[in-house]
Structures are given as structure tokens and as C-alpha cells.
Amino acid sequence: MKKFLRSIVGLLSLCLLTVSVFRPVSAQESGPTDDEVNAVASQLYCPVCENIPLDACGTVACEQWRGIIRDKLAQGWTEDEIKDYFVAQYGDRVLAEPPVQGFNWLAYLIPFMVLVGGLVLLVFGFRKWRVTESLQSTPPRRKTGLQDPEIDQEYLRKVEEELEARTRGRG
Amino acid sequence: MKKLLLWSALALLIVILSVGLYRSQQGQINVGQPAPEFTLVTFSGESYQLSDYQGSVVVVNFWASWCETCKPEAKDLEAAYKFYKSRGDVLFLGVDYVDTEPEALAYLKEFGITYPNGPDLRTEISQAFRIRGVPETFIIDQEGLIAHLQIGPFLSLEEIKAIIDPLLK
């Protein structure tokens, strides 16, 4: 019985050893998974069909490009190396995010400029609003008994006219 | 001063957007306009610069292996190339638009194409010609002006010859 158990344990150990030795080999043979390919493809855009990421594009061309990604990954290329290869072949427009250089700077600068401009406008707007509000909340001048600034002006104009007329009358 | 800065920034933004809009709305290169200068490096590594071929008629065909409508004209273009080859004053160039090299080479082999073909690296040539798709063919006269623009495939060898023959002096 002991001999039988020993031989079973020995057989199982041999099986485990075999599996552990051959498993990495079989993984290498299967190559990159679809998820690994799509992880890179999602960062690239189809240069033929506009605004469609490579991982979601169903055209023959996109299938070929996903095939290239698979081949490059299998050869041990990194994500950045693959992206550089695609840019060299098809131009910057394949990238989901344009590189920060040349005219592309505008893509990053304009939203920032609009945001800053909007904030500046808001700050000035609030300031003006506060000044107007404080002017409006100033208590009326009790000495003259007048409250409306327009009526004040009209009143002053009439007083000045009267004074002028009197001065002329004396002269 | 602050107002001036704000207005300047707004004016700059409008100028930038206008330039972008103008560039995106630019149509195709028309017949009679000068052909844009370009250099094509073929799959076998030879280099062809358009300005070196002033005095020759140049046929620039944009194609791709994934393009089904490119296939019917492939053999006619090769036949036309062979027809004019001995004259030495007609150059055929195939520009492979956003394609993968193994499939492109298989396409050239399948249709027996022997005239110079190369990839449109960084899509610079197709952008210079402002193509809208493939196949598109530009035939450039001996003065370097666009003499014919073919959108879609040629239907026969005779059609190609009917365009090239009057351009040859």
C-alpha cells in the first residue's frame, strides 16, 4: 500500500513538474491577447475612418493595423515603440493625444486661455457688480432731500440757469 | 490696457480658428495648378523626387491594399506603364496610402505591378495633394502642372492612353 501511495505521489509530482516546465512555453506560443492588443489600439486612431479608435474600428485596414500591433507586441516592442512606429508610418493624426510640439501647442493652450479669460471676465464682472451695488445702497442725502441722481442733476441745472439769469439782470 | 489685452487675445483666437477653418475647407488641387513637390521612397529603397522629372509626364496613383475599387485599375495602370516604358518620358509612381507593408507587397505581386511604388510615409504626399480617398490619380504634364485628376478607378487602358497621349510632345 505504501509503495502504491509513493508511486502515486511520484507520478503527481512528475505531472506538476511537467506542467510547470511547459506552461511558459505554451504562453509564449499563444502570443499577445486581444486585451493587450486593444490596450495599445485604443491609444491610436484609424487614419482612414475619422474619429474612430483603432480598437473599435471594423474596417479591413484597421484589422491589418491591429495585426501589426500583435506582431510588434509578440516581438517584444513596448507601447511607446509601437506608437512611434505608427506615427512614423501614418503621421501624428493616428495618436489619440497630439504630441506637444509645433502647431499642436494650440490644442493644449486654447482651452487654458479660454478658461483664464473666462475667469478674468468673471472677476471683473463681480467687481463691477459690487461697486454698483454699493453705490445703490448709499443712503439718500438728507440735506437736499433729493434721492434720485437724475432729478439732482435737473435741479442743479435749473439753479445754475436761475443764477445766470439773475447775474445778467444785475449787469 | 486690460481691455486691449482682452481684445487682442480674442482677435488672436478668431484668426487661429479662421486659419484652421480655411485649411479644412480647402478643396482638392485642381487641373492647371502646379503639382506639389514630393519625394517618394519606394518599397525597394529607390527615391523619386518630382522636380527631377520636369519635362516628363508623371502619373501619380494613390492606392491601398484594403481598397477594393483600386483593384480593377491595377492591371490597366501596369499595362499603361509597359506601353510607355520604352519612350522614357512617362513616369508612373504608385503611392500606397495608409497601408501595411506585407499586404501592400502582396497586392503588388498579385497584380504584377512593376512600376515604382512606395508607402506614403506620415501621409505627407496625400496631404500635399489633398486627396479625399483612394483610388485617385493625378497626371502631371511636362511643365509640372496638374493636367488630369482621376477620382475613382480608370476603367480601361484606352482611357489612360487617351489622357496621356495629348500631353506628350
Image: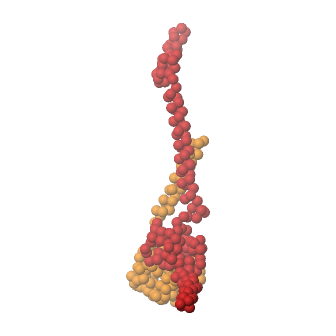
Chain colours: A red, B orange
In this orientation, which residue lies closer to the viewer: A101 or B116?
A101
Relative to A52, say whether B3 is above or below. Answer: above
Relative to A144, say whether B7 is above or below. Answer: below
Q: Is residue B116 visible?
A: no
- Residue A65 position within the rendered picture, expressed as x and y whole percent measured from the top left: 50, 76
- Residue B56 position within the rendered picture, expressed as x and y whole percent measured from the top left: 53, 80
In this orientation, which residue lies closer to the viewer: A42 or A3?
A3
In this orientation, which residue lies closer to the viewer: B29 or B166?
B29
In this orientation, which residue lies closer to the viewer: A36 or A1?
A1
Question: Which residue is painted at 57% across and 74% down in the image?
Answer: A82
Relative to B78, say whether B141 is above or below. Answer: above
- Residue A167 position within the rendered picture, expressed as x and y whole percent measured from the top left: 54, 11
Question: Which of the image's four quarters has the N terminus of chain B?
Answer: top right
Question: Which residue is painted at 56% across and 91% down in the image?
Answer: A3
- Residue A162 position within the rendered picture, expressed as x and y whole percent measured from the top left: 49, 14
Q: How many marks?
A: 0
Question: Which residue is painted at 56% across and 58% down in the image?
Answer: A108
Question: Which residue is painted at 58% across and 45% down in the image?
Answer: B5
Q: Is residue B105 visible?
A: yes
* Residue, far left: B155
* Residue, far front: A1
